[in-house]
Image (cartoon, rainbow, N blue to C red):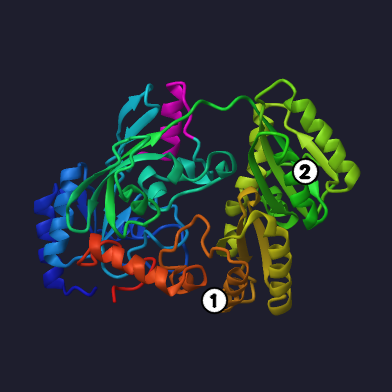
Amino acid sequence: MTTNSNNASQLMDSLCALLEPSRVTWSSTDLEKYGKDWSKHIQPSPLAIVFPKTRDEVQQLVQWARHHRQPLVPSGGRTGLSGGATAARGEVVVSMEKMNHILDFNPIDQSVTVEPGVVTEALQNYVREQGFYFPVDFAARGSSQIGGNIATNAGGIKVLRYGLMRQWVAGLEVVTGQGELLQLNQGLIKNATGYDLRQLFIGSEGTLGLITQATLAVTRPPQDAMVLLFSVPELDGLMKLYQSFRSQLPLLAFEMFTDKALGYVLKGSGLTCPLQARSNFYVLMELEKVSSDVEDKAMDLFSSALEQGWIADGALAQSPQQAREFWRLREDITEATSFAEPYKNDISVRVSQVPEFLLEMDGVLNTHYPDFEVVWFGHIGDGNLHISILKPGSLSSQEFLDRCHRVDELLFSLIQKYEGSVSAEHGVGLVKKPHLQFSRSPAEIELMRQIKGLFDPDGILNPGKIFDSLT
């Protein structure tokens, strides 16, 4: 969208009349801060930022946007990596950070109702104080918001045991692109009354409606956890180790990272590696101690894996502090490699195909881009791999970006061959939009466009995300 100065001034005046002027800003600092997420290489260009406090104000904003044909971009913690919360074409950003209240907790229903701006970690802490547990968890827990987690169907480190965000959304309140308020499922466990529209909004990236409330299921806290770290010499050892432990013990998480990734974390964090034997790959495993014999069984499986040559070394965290340090070896990878302007991809294949895919993709990158350093890590227990290509010092940012776009064609063609996904948990947004056809058929994409048209006939909600304008 392009807006001349007179029209922009009129729009700002009407927004300030709609909300308190203090909750409308177009300062350059705020436009830069709220106009983008964690994705790089996309310049934000929002018209203004607004901060509603109530569902009524959200409805009024959508009705205002329809009247003025003004696109809106919903914004949460802005921790996404696909440009889904980036306003690049003069949109008004609707920040949910002031809608940050926990509204209700029901121990009988085992549910909590929250506004979309509640920070993930704040919710986790609140639920823990009530004697319950909210299991959707990831490194950005301290800044991500629940509305954004729902809009992207967030995954994270406990998907293996607890599933995706989708499994924990019991009800939604949303404002559609027509300004209509919908109450979806209302926290019911059983509801066989036709289409479950709630599920359409989960993972829709704000293209169908704006979330104003969510009722989330909670569960009992897990038993004490065991955190183990293994060095794995060869790729095929990863799945052998996974199958051995998964078949006999209650896995909470099964994460993988490469020696390159570990090296960057150790260099930048001051942490030390607890393993004497370094290897090409590492597995971080978390087990729930549901019975007294879990630890003994884990040690037996560790000894067997060592004898089989699947692992070269292993360590069991001896305290909660050491367990946190083990997890930092995995969770600090993103921060440790940020200096190199990494070009990121987030893909998934079936769990059984991870070693084969990883080997083939690594070969492609080494053949075609031998000067690129690639850092692999991910939630291997659910088939999700993160790929960070580090920018060589000899390339400018634009040269690097151009070459990485050519890498995308190789990577996503291989994903298509394996019938995988070009975005496992980061969403499509702007970054993955050109590659959607590698994971979705033309018929599926067209149906999604038609669904978008039903809920947002004017195309004002997060336009240009996932796919281009309606046909």
Q: Report which quarter residue 91 is drawn in.
A: bottom left
Residue 133 included in the magenta stretch of the image: yes
Type of the residue with mark 1: His
Mark positioned earlier in the residue sequence (2 or 1): 2
Q: Is residue 339 above or below residue 194?
A: below
What residue occupies the far right of the structure in this picture? 307
Spot occupied by residue 130 in the image (x, y as percentages of width and height): 42, 21
Q: Quadrant of the C terminus?
A: bottom left
Neighbour tally class for label 2: few under 14, some 14-19, many 20 plus, Cα within 10 Å:
many
Spot occupied by residue 125 in the image (x, y as percentages of width and height): 45, 29
Q: Quadrant of the N terminus?
A: bottom left
Q: Secondary structure at mark 2?
A: strand
Calculate the distance from the C-alpha at mark 2 to the C-alpha at mark 1: 34 Å
Residue at the spot 11% in from the left edge and 51% down from the top edge: 18
Residue at the spot 24% in from the left edge and 67% down from the top edge: 459
Q: Nearer the viewer, residue 149 or 279?
A: 149
Neighbour tally class for label 1: few under 14, some 14-19, many 20 plus, Cα within 10 Å:
few
Q: Secondary structure at mark 1?
A: helix
Q: Is residue 153 above or below residue 82?
A: above
Disc 1 marks which residue?
405
Q: Nearer the viewer, residue 48 or 357?
A: 357
Residue 227 included in the magenta stretch of the image: no
Q: Are marks 2 and 1 in contact (CB under 8 Å)?
A: no
Apparent side of residue 22 relative to residue 85 in the rendered image (left or right): left
Spot occupied by residue 81 in the image (x, y as percentages of width and height): 47, 59
Apparent side of residue 221 relative to residue 469 in the rendered image (left or right): right
Type of the residue with mark 2: Phe
Disc 2 marks which residue?
230
Q: Report which quarter residue 236 is drawn in.
A: bottom right
Residue stretch in magenta:
118-134
